[in-house]
Amino acid sequence: MLIISLVFLGPALHLMRKSTEAARTGPFAARVSSLIAVAGITLFWLSRWLPREHPGATWIYAIPLVAGSLAVVALAILSVQAPKALGVREVDVAPRTLWSFGSRWWFAGWYTLTALLLATAVVCGLTSSTDELGRHTMLVLDVGSHQAGTSFFGWAFGVPVLVASVLLLVIGHLAISQTVRPAVSADPKQRALDIASRCAEIRTIVAVAAGATAFVLGAVLLFVAGSAGMVASFPAADGVRVELGTSFAALRTPFLAAGLILQGFGLCLALLPLFQRKGALISSIPGQVPVAAGTADR
């Protein structure tokens, strides 16, 4: 997973350094946010050693998502600045939306990953069965009078992930709204720097949120891939042993590959803000940036 993450990280850093590099609070806030997100991923790996009977064992897949929410909150708090007093003639009055300071592809990727994670959690939950503790953590094969079961990403694991995913989506959009809301200066130089700063901040929010989502989606697919390899073996009437597998056994290898790639990609996105540098506007602003057509005349 680390190797895959490094493979993604190189091109990502190259693209980031070709884009806007200004930040209202410098790289400190972005680095703190990145460290919190990476800490959540690390805690997830450490928590996987919990015994299945532990009360918190079913919550471990939500840990990176909760850490992503905390990372976004930390970024929003550290990026807060006292509002500047700008006169009517000093303000760009062009309308601004949540997508005004970032590429729509950023948001499309984040939304797609979230939708895939939610859909996977729901489908797995509907497929799962209860264990001896009454929790939906099992996949059971019924073959006549015989049964075979294995651990599975059921509702016990999926519900915390569903809640944490929606929470991350809401907190992320609130943080973006806070970034977009303040007025933009009409002074061309100051306006360019302000827009560049907001683009960098929104990019950090989307990177942390999408990174946590991609990592959890990859972890879920790896869990499902492990369950897909289950084989039930029982003796037939003629004494010959019969072996049956899951209905999605053929997807085991694709799930393994996709899970590893998504985990590496998610870790890469979480690490990306750690390398953010404070600088000047060195290229055009990505996305749909408000134009100066609404600027008051001087």
Image (spheres, rainbow, N blue to C red):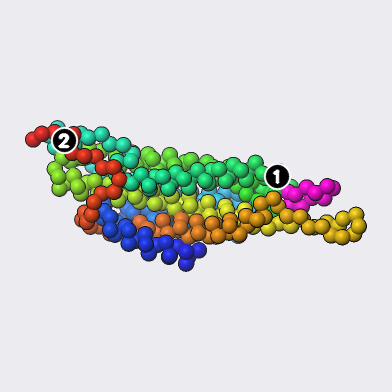
Residue depicted at x 32% and y 58%: 15
Which callout, 1 or 2, points to the residue nearer the camera?
2
The answer to whether residue 51 is seen in the rendering is: no
Q: Picture quarter containing residue 12?
A: bottom left
Q: Nearer the viewer, residue 236 or 223?
A: 236
Name which of mark 1 and mark 2 comes first in the sequence.
Answer: 1
Q: Residues within 10 Å of mark 1 (few under 14, many from 20)?
A: many
Query: In the rendering, at what x and y percent does residue 231 appear?
Result: 74, 57
Q: Which residue is mark 2?
A: 295
Q: Magenta span covers which residues? A: 140-149
Per the image, label 1 sits on a secondary structure element best described as: strand
Horizontal side of residue 245 vs 236, given as left or right? left
Q: Amino acid at mark 1?
A: Ser
Per the image, label 2 sits on a secondary structure element best described as: loop
Residue depicted at x 46% and y 56%: 266
Q: CA distance from mark 1 to mark 2?
A: 61 Å
Horizontal side of residue 51 vs 87, given as left or right? right
Horizontal side of residue 143 vs 246, given as left or right? right
Quadrant location of the C terminus in the rendered image: top left
State yes or no: residue 130 in magenta. Answer: no
- Give the total of numbered labels: 2
The answer to whether residue 34 is seen in the rendering is: yes
Q: Nearer the viewer, residue 243 or 173?
A: 243
Query: In the rendering, at what x and y percent does residue 24 appear?
Result: 25, 50
Query: In the rendering, at what x and y percent does residue 40 appear?
Result: 47, 55
Q: Which residue is mark 1?
A: 129
Query: In the rendering, at what x and y percent does residue 275 appear?
Result: 33, 61
State yes or no: residue 148 in magenta. Answer: yes
Horizontal side of residue 102 vs 165, given as left or right? left
Residue depicted at x 41% and y 41%: 171
